[in-house]
Image: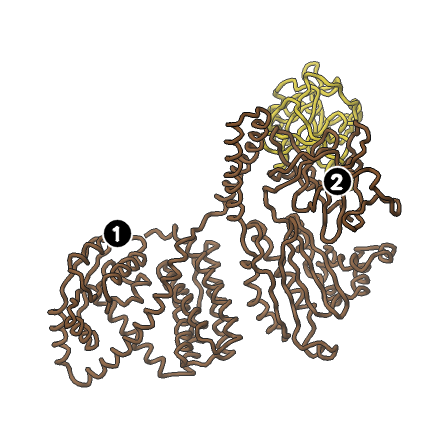
Chain colours: A brown, B yellow
Amino acid sequence: MDMNQYLEVFIEESKEHLQSCNEKLLELEKNPKDLSIVNEIFRSAHTLKGMSATMGYEDIANLTHQMENVLDAIRNEKLAVTSDLFDAVFVSVDNLEEMVFSIAQGGDGKKDVSAVVEMLKKIEDGEDLNHDSSKSENQGNSLNQNHNNHAIQEYDDFEYTIIQQSREQGFSAYEVTISLREDCLLKAARVFMVFEILEQLGEVIKAVPSVDLLEEEKFDSQFSVAIITNDSSDDIHNKVMKVSEIKEVVVQQLDHLAMMNNQANSQATVLVETNQNDEVEKETHQHVQENSVKAAEKQVAATSSKTIRVNIERLDILMNLFEELVIDRGRLEQISKDLNNNELNETVERMSRISGDLQNIILNMRMVPVETVFNRFPRMIRQLAKDLNKKINLEIIGAETELDRTVIDEIGDPLVHLLRNAIDHGIEMPDVRLKNGKSEEGHVVLSAYHSGNHVFIEIEDDGAGINRERVLKKALDRGVVTEQQAATLTDKQVYELIFSSGFSTADQISDISGRGVGLDVVKSTIESLGGSVSIDSVESKGSKFSIQLPLTLSIISVMLVELQNEKYAIPLSSIIETAVIKKDAILQAHNQQVIDFRGKIVPLVYLTEIFEVPVETGNEDYVSLIIVRKGEKMAALVVDSFIGQQEIVLKSLGNYLSSVFAISGATILGDGQVALIIDCNALIK
Amino acid sequence: MGEYLSEDVKFIVFQLQDEEYGIPVHQVRSIEKVQYITRVPRTAPYIKGVINLRGVVTPIVDLRSRFGLEEQVNLDSLRIIIVSKDEMDVGFIVDAANDVIDIPLNIIEPAPEVVGAVQVDFIKGVAKLDKRLIVMIDLEEVLKVEKDRLLTV
């Protein structure tokens, strides 16, 4: 069977399950009493085991299997949740991650996991030897079942009683043997569908191989199920046959068979019988558990079937095509305006609305909550704190903030870097913190939020902060700045120095100044995404790294304006409002023209002057303004006239014109001309 | 150029003022008629702006003013040669795009100290074909120096 087509899905899903294991484990560490969390971890591990076994990754399957055993012992309260146990499970998850990543990178996913498995076994044994023996018995049992997978050969007392009783109540019992086609690809899915149908018909009392093994696709192509139902054997046959990829369904009335087997059983010795009774109990117990697990999985399956995975490249192509459409839409809108034909107007309006909706959908498809990056940090911080003997409390705010997929993919590494920095160099040792009158536990806040056209991600710690003098001294030693420059630098400029490349290369600097290992890489990565990073720090109080990122939405709403004969676009996200005022309402303050805008003094910015637009027409009595903001600050941009609001496709000016002042890009208008997009942030000091 | 000594390379030949210049054809993407150019403020004076080249915003350099020549009058023959370097497309405004010719690499001589008014930096060499003198442009220099200057603006 060619597994390649499933590989991608396998890798994605494995990563998700491992991530959820990590998260839940951290949660469990906080509430060791909450066994429902264990159940969830168990479920993830269980699925992972099944998937990896199907795909032929034995090492992963082995390790997850052993992990499952330990988790099972926990949820059955045979094992206490200890910190040793956590470490062991975390190590296993790490190992699993390593293997999955190796598969993702084209490796074979093989790894010597015997040491970890041994460790898990020891944990399992050390606490409860009995449990382990029962476990192996269980395994033997299921193995046994695995062998006779052609028809159910025996029914124990318990099952026999059920069959008997239900017959008395007018139900019949059938044994249904289902053979899947040889080329059936998703055996587990077929099993699931068969069970779904059977459960609608009546009660499934036994399956050979066990439900467990069936779900893991550990069977050839045939399995048998005992079912109690009202329906006729033909009904069962027909309904089950409706599932595709099934070769054959054989339905047999059970009564005879069961009777015979039972008789054979009762001939066995008393000792065996008691033994069996034990097993019956165990079996039912297992059944109940499995049923509940299955029910839960069914729910998951029901919701997950509503989503599909789409290759990001396809989304990119869709996006590019849509951009073309938006440009043509603009053109159409203009033509219909010029022609002023009612029917055409209506059609174009309708098309605009639909494509607007379409656009929202496409954009949203590309947006991913930053959570997907953030959720790997708690685990990392735990380890880091442990390694460094520090106490750290990580707080995550705004994980639901959404960012374009392309940015999400890139932002992980810089964040890891900054967080490590904050914990390694920022947060002091517990005793030092106590001495300085701080709480023993260091506090790190990782937050994300939207503002205007940007997303901000901040990392704030309450650690030692940055020592201006030390940074300066090292910068001077390294020749990053000159004495003269040093004297004039503001605190903020000094802190920025730790981002300079001179700082990252020398180890002793990072030891003394406390920060600066490879931060230049962080900075360049963020800048390559069109973002920026800044530092704020108060010595002995802590530091704050603030990253500003563009949403990189390639389609944005803008206000088109005219400056003499030139057209410019101003992103709607930074506009507060537009206004037309009389010239005599302009005031002078410190050589700067300002206006009184709703009680606030707002400086005027003459765009024609800033952009050196050739002026042709004379002065008028009125001034058209666009009030824009950058955070708290505002400015009033003076333009000649407003053209109107429009959706535009962001286009880069390219590498050749990479740093044009106050221009963040360009777009192509309906008439095919290029209009430049004004970067309001650059205009507000 | 050692191993290519005897090879012929196709060159796009264009005109600036009274001289003919050449760019290897593999560096040229297309030749366009002059269309509406959107001015980009606060850039170097020889950057005329950007055009919409089939959906791609492409910067346009006036090669005359880049080479320090007198700015051209509006000629019907004005063309934009789109060159491509490191996946970066830039258009050059030239007086006229004349033809495509094969030039054996071994007849290209190093740039003489003085070639008209054009700075020697931009010139890779000159080729003499019959009575024509064709100046080979060093595209990298023309674009690179530009980039450096932009950053300091």
Specify whether A168 is left or right of A597: left
Q: Which mark is residue A426?
A: none
Extreme-bottom residue of the structure:
A271
Q: Up-down: is A347 above or below B34?
A: below
For disc 2, the marked residue is: A625
Mark 2 surroundings within 10 Å by alpha-carbon count, few (fewer than 14), some (14 through 19), many (20 or more): many
Q: Quadrant of residue A170?
A: bottom left
Residue B149 seen in the current view = no
> Which tag is nearer the camera, tag 2 or tag 1?
2
Residue corresponding to mark 1:
A245
**Picture quadrant of residue A679:** top right
Amino acid type at circle 2 is: Leu
| Left-right relation of A365 to B151 | left
Chain letter belonging to callout 1: A
Q: Amino acid at mark 1?
A: Glu
- Nearer-the-camera pick, B24 or A244: A244
Query: Where residue A417 sits in the image (x, y, percent)?
Result: 64, 61
